[in-house]
Amino acid sequence: MTILVTGATGTIGSLVIQGLAQRGAKVKALVRQAGKAALPQGVTEAVADMSDVAAMREALSGVRSLFLLNAVTPAEVTHGLQTLALARDMGIQRIVYLSVIHADRFTDVPHFTGKYTVERMIESLDVPATVLRPAYFMQNERQVQAVIQGYGVYPMPIGAAGVAMIDTRDIADVAVAELLRRDASPEPLPRVTMDLGGPELFTGESAAAAWSRALGREVRYGGDDLQAFEAQLAQYGPGWMAYDMRLMMQRIQQHGMKPAAGTAERLEALIGHPLRRYEALVNELVAEAS
């Protein structure tokens, strides 16, 4: 039975492919350019841009299960809805969709509302799917590691409400477990929505303290200035994305990113190992850079 993984070359998708391949699943990886991705042995390519309906029909041909991950782009909603519709038309009834925690609450954050729109299609049409709602990725810290180590400042303005950061490897482990569970079932399974969050809540101050311990010198929290955060991001990427990230951080400062009670325990039971800790990831990043 073939599982198609979209977002195959990204952080989560590549980990999902590795996990499925290690478990002996038959996997197709959706890529935009043939031969560019380093794929595990036995994984085949399906070459398509998600905007190309004919190419996506071909990619979905012969597929039993689908891992749907849409990159944050202006076309994200179209890609998500269109891929789900094509999968439905082709009789695919085993789907895992990667959304985001609080997609239904952070309604002024464009990429959150985009993912929630896809969730609404899944719900209204009762698509047999697992909707995964992860919190802030621990591995996002790679993007600011040079600032942390070079200037002694933790620059992500996550505030003080509390964020249950989660390791991308744990997200992938959950996705693999759900894909295999659905793929192995003789009948489509009921729809499920799952929060994904780590075992601890972190604030800007406590994240900075974790870096201080790992580096053996003081790292201070850079504060909650969202205007400065947006301006910094806009130097390296499109303005629409910088503003989207600013709105997300504003909501995080106001409400945090807190999964439902008991989430960590449920996830650990599903994947069969303890969730990775933020401090362990920080130590890992520091060791890699040394």
Image (cartoon, rainbow, N blue to C red):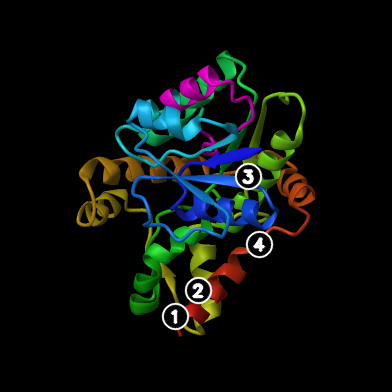
- Please name the residue that numbered disc 4 is placed on: 276
Span of residues in magenta: 82-103
Looking at the image, is mark 3 or mark 1 earlier in the sequence?
Answer: 3
- Residue 165 as seen in the image, left or right of residue 78: right
Between marks 3 and 1 in the image, the one whose residue lies nearer the viewer:
3
Which amino acid type is marked by label 1?
Answer: Ala
- Please name the residue that numbered disc 3 is placed on: 175
- Please name the residue that numbered disc 1 is placed on: 289
**Which residue appears at 60% of the width and 20% of the height?**
127
The residue closer to the viewer here, 259 or 142, is 142
**Disc 2/disc 1 C-alpha distance (Å):** 6 Å
**Disc 3/disc 4 C-alpha distance (Å):** 16 Å
Asked which secondary structure carries label 2, the reply is: helix
Give yes or no for contact between labels 2 and 1 (Cβ–Cβ under 8 Å). yes
Residue 155, how many percent across, how many down?
37, 63
Label of residue 285 in the image: 2
Q: Is disc 4 surrounded by few (<14), some (14 to 19) or many (20+) residues within 10 Å?
A: some
Which amino acid type is marked by label 3?
Answer: Ala
Looking at the image, is mark 3 or mark 4 earlier in the sequence?
Answer: 3
Give yes or no for contact between labels 4 and 1 (Cβ–Cβ under 8 Å). no
- Residue 13 as seen in the image, left or right of residue 197: left
Asked which secondary structure carries label 1, the reply is: helix
Asked which secondary structure carries label 4, the reply is: loop
Which amino acid type is marked by label 4?
Answer: Arg
Which quadrant holds residue 167? bottom right
Residue 44, how many percent across, how many down?
51, 49
